[in-house]
Image: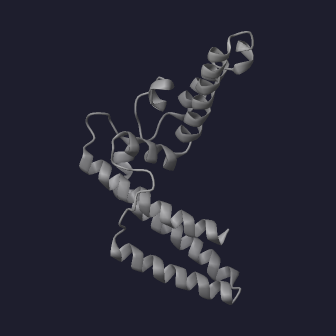
Amino acid sequence: MNYFELYNLPVSLQPNQQLVKQQFYALSRQYHPDFFTQSDDAAQADILDKSSQVNKAFNVLRNRDETIRYVLQLKGLLEEDEKYQLPPSFLMEMLELNEQLADARLENDTSAIENIQLEINDIQQKLYEPVQAIVEHYQEGVTTEKELLQVKAYYYQKKYLNRILAGIN
């Protein structure tokens, strides 16, 4: 059972957060281990597993990047530890950004570092624009594999940028 089935939600790249939260609370009560202390060991282990799945699903469905990753995995378009080939132009741009960041750190130039952070945020927004409609209007059985591959490219580029941002902070 996938996370969307568990939460009784349609597969989506952007699930309704209010419904995710409602389902989380309902499922947390339904599968709370404290309600099964009198059950046999097998039933307790099963409930513990379901409770764990509810929590994992919640963490994925509440985070847009994780939800995108999860849906791409469900569709067989993204594998764990995949060595995705980023476009050379993107990598060159990132090389320049990293060099600017290294220089700014060397000079302890907080203003330049802040400007790089803003530039990264602008790049992320520009990367999102071509896939925004796909992400926001994803429909099971309607959205094409070609469109999902565009979302995959966005996912990996954003992931790369997030690593740079994490290094700054």
Image coordinates of residue 75 in percent, x first then y, are 33, 41
Q: Nearer the viewer, residue 45 or 146?
A: 45
Front-lying residue, 112 or 6: 6
Q: Quadrant of residue 63?
A: top right
Q: Nearer the viewer, residue 113 or 3?
A: 3
**Which residue is located at x 45 percent, y 43 percent?**
70
Question: In which quarter of the view is residue 162 placed?
Answer: bottom right
Colouring chosen for the image of the structure: one colour
Residue 17 at least partly seen = yes
Outermost residue to the top: 38
Percent of width and height locating residue 26:
62, 20
Residue 46 screen position, x and y as percent: 60, 20
The number of callouts visible is: 0
Q: Quadrant of the C terminus?
A: bottom right
Q: Picture coordinates of residue 53 (x, y %)?
A: 57, 30
Q: Is residue 22 visible?
A: no
Q: Give above or below for 4 relative to 47.
A: below
Nearer-the-camera pick, 42 or 11: 42
**In-image side of 97 versus 146 (left or right):** right
Q: Is residue 96 left or right of residue 163?
A: left
The quarter of the picture where residue 74 lies is top left
Q: Quadrant of the N terminus?
A: top left
Q: Is residue 153 above or below residue 167?
A: above
Residue shown at the point (60%, 26%) measured from the top left:
49
**Height in image: 116 above or below 54?**
below
